[in-house]
Image (cartoon, grey):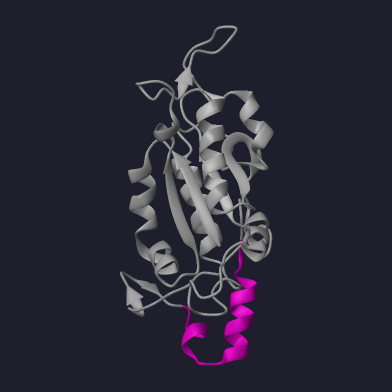
Amino acid sequence: MKIQVITLFPNMINETLNSSMMFKASKNEIVEFKVIDLRQFGLGPRKQVDDTPYGGGDGMLMRVEPIHEAVMEAKKYAPNSKVVIMTPAGKTLAQPMVRDMAAEALDLIIICAHYEGYDERVLSFVDTQISLGEYILTGGELPALVLIDSIVRLLPGVLGGEKSAEIESFSEEGVIEYPQYTKPREYNGMNVPEVLLNGHHAEILKWQKDNYKKAV
């Protein structure tokens, strides 16, 4: 799986992709990451990527030309990539969507928007719009990293245990995992439930099922 990120802040993306499980996935050749600096496709001597909006309004909009050129460059590396833009106007990211994207393992080109948004014509070459929720961030880098992490961790060989991704939170819609405990057995008067200590597998499974949490 090839994942390319188009961003004005490559260091922000690289720092995370070179850490923890994302680094492991890349090192083990489960996924290939490529970070594209949008500024390289900016216009004029100042490499401009934004401008004032027609019709007035505060702030600046990202221009269509640099983004389009960056996407075309990315498609030279992975021609069949699905183009995604992180935007509050998109479909809210949820675990079923993540599972589908991981199962398809399609190559992705992720656009990180900035400023007050982007020229609407950008959407003419975007396949999917994805949101993290009904709030606004300063840019698309954090949402892009969340999307990447959520997908890559489900790819075979990344987490290690075959069942790791099957029994975790949101494996069933709206359901969060049961409470879990580790050592010490007692801490400040708080004890591990006795059922988890008796070694009776069927009773433990029943307790876990009875204590699944529901998402608020």
Which corner quadrant holds the N terminus? bottom right
**Number of numbered markers:** 0
Q: Is residue 203 magenta?
A: yes
Residue 138 falls within the magenta-colored stretch: no
Q: Position of residue 65 (x, y in %)?
A: 54, 27
Q: Is residue 102 left or right of residue 67?
A: right
Residue pictured at 50% horizontal, 22% vertical: 116
Q: Residue at x 52, y 62 (%)?
A: 152
Task: Give the residue displayed 63% in from the left and 57% down from the top.
Answer: 95
Residue in front for this viewpoint, 29 or 53: 29
Q: Where's residue 158, x and y in %?
A: 48, 71
Q: Is residue 120 above or below residue 133?
A: above
Residues in magenta, as a range: 193-213
Q: Residue at x 64, y 62 (%)?
A: 99
Residue situated furthest bottom in the rendering? 199
| Above or below for 103 versus 148 | below
Answer whether residue 25 is visible to the viewer in this image: yes
